[in-house]
Amino acid sequence: MAEMRQTNGHKPVPDLHALVANRFAQSTAVPEKFFTAEADNIAQACWAMAKRFHRHGRLIAFGNGSRATDAQHVSVEFVHPVIVGKRALPALALTNDSALLSGLSGQGLNFAHQLRLLARPQDIAMAFFAADNGRDANILAALTEAQEIGLLTLGLTNAGIVQPNLDFCFVVPSDDAMIVQETHETLYHILWELVHIFFEHEGLLV
């Protein structure tokens, strides 16, 4: 908790320097711990993703609420590379079709329904969800659907009690939503970059 600084005749105010220092410490310590622990799994996930793209698979991303924007962000990264010379790779976010989502909202399994109609076995499912959030039941249902179809499944989530049985599940060891989101964003930028590195060595993808 941030220290309080007493001012003459006024209410105590937060020590803003301490607030910033504490926030910065969290924003560096949690990702450092995560990426140190997950380096090998991240490399394996990138290799698996690159092989799916090599077989003309697509990345299909989804998430609820604020995590929907991560799904949109990662799909744009793959479709529209920010580095000149990197190939565009097929990706879509299931969160983009507001008409379809609102039409299916009462069913509660909107993403699973979309995957059932759109996904192919060589595709990749990337889900953003909260491990201990019962409101993300539709995400877990969609991942089950993806597994049944044969997709490569990746989950990006936070510290929680129960994790689904996915091909790759990246758990950020924090319950701070902002720290988790910051780490996830760095993670999918790394996934993007390493997938392209594997494409520079296509002999590894057959």
Image (cartoon, rainbow, N blue to C red):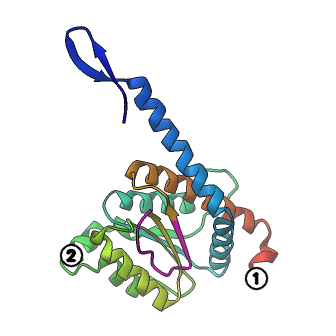
Residue farthest along the top direction in this orientation: 8
> Which numbered disc flags the more N-terminal residue, 1 or 2?
2
Residue at mark 2: 103
Q: Where 49 falls versus 83 (above or below)? A: below
The x, y position of residue 66, in whole percent, is 34, 56
Inspect this view and state whether residue 196 appears: yes
Amino acid type shown at disc 1: Val
Residue farthest along the bottom direction in this orientation: 148
The x, y position of residue 9, in whole percent, is 20, 9
Per the rendering, the mark at residue 206 is 1
Q: From which residue to which does the magenta span run?
A: 159-170
Q: Where 86 falls versus 179 (above or below)? A: below
Image quadrant for the C terminus? bottom right
The residue tagged with tag 2: helix, strand or loop? helix
Q: Where 184 falls versus 131 (above or below)? A: above
Amino acid type shown at disc 2: Gly
